[in-house]
Amino acid sequence: MSCGEPHETDCSEVLDHLYEFLDREMPEGDCTKFEVHFEECSPCLEKYGLEQAVKKLVKRCCGQDDVPADLRSKVMGRIELIRAGETVPEQDVALGDADRPAATAE
């Protein structure tokens, strides 16, 4: 997605880090770059608005549920692996080792 105009901050960078911006998990300088980009680029601003609305809807509908600490830990561990560029195992994050079905020998 791009408006076709050159920007100081590329559309792909903005879209790749949109949730970090929405969640206020990025340095202030990067936030400022993104805000400038949104002023210049209507397709990215539209995507931002859509994702912001979805986030608010999810919070309103699901925001009262407590996330189990072990699940949160597993998800955060996977996020760190992905950020570090490591391979993430193909296993269900929601299942603990005790809940996971045993492998069957053939």
Image: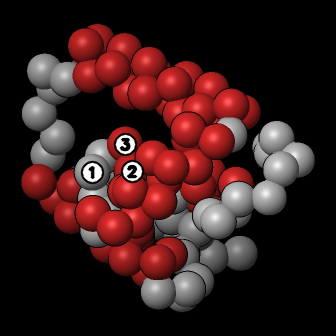
Mark 3 sits on what residue? Answer: 22
Q: Residue at x 27, y 51 (%)?
A: 24
Q: Nearer the viewer, residue 50 or 71?
A: 50
In the rendered image, the vertical position of residue 57 relative to residue 6, given as above or below? above
Image quadrant in which the N terminus is located: top right
- Depth check: give the residue in front, 20 or 63: 20
- How is the model colour-coded? secondary structure
Where residue 105 appears, as percent x and y from the top left, is 62, 76
Q: Residues within 10 Å of mark 2 (few under 14, many from 20)?
A: many
Q: Residue at x 40, y 65 (%)?
A: 30
The amino acid marked with disc number 3 is: Leu
Amino acid identity at mark 1: Arg
User: How far across and down, in percent of the image, does residue 63 sit?
Assistant: 20, 23
Per the image, the residue denoted by label 1 is: 24
- The amino acid beneath tag 2 is Phe
Tag on residue 58?
Answer: none
Q: In the rendered structure, are the residues bearing label 2 and label 1 in contact, judged by CB atoms less than 8 Å apart?
A: yes
Give the residue drawn at x 47%, y 78%: 83
13 or 41, which is in the foreground? 41
Circles 3 and 1, Cβ within 8 Å, touching? The answer is: yes
Q: Quadrant of residue 75?
A: bottom left
- Say whether residue 3 is left or right of residue 23: right
Q: Are marks 3 and 2 in contact (CB under 8 Å)?
A: yes
The answer for how far apart the CA atoms under marks 3 and 1 are is: 6 Å
> Secondary structure beneath disc 2?
helix
Q: Secondary structure at mark 1?
A: loop
Marks 2 and 1, Cα distance to the nearest angstrom? 5 Å
Distance in Å between CA atoms under marks 3 and 2 = 4 Å
| Residue at mark 2 | 21
Residue 18 at what x, y percent from top left?
Answer: 50, 49
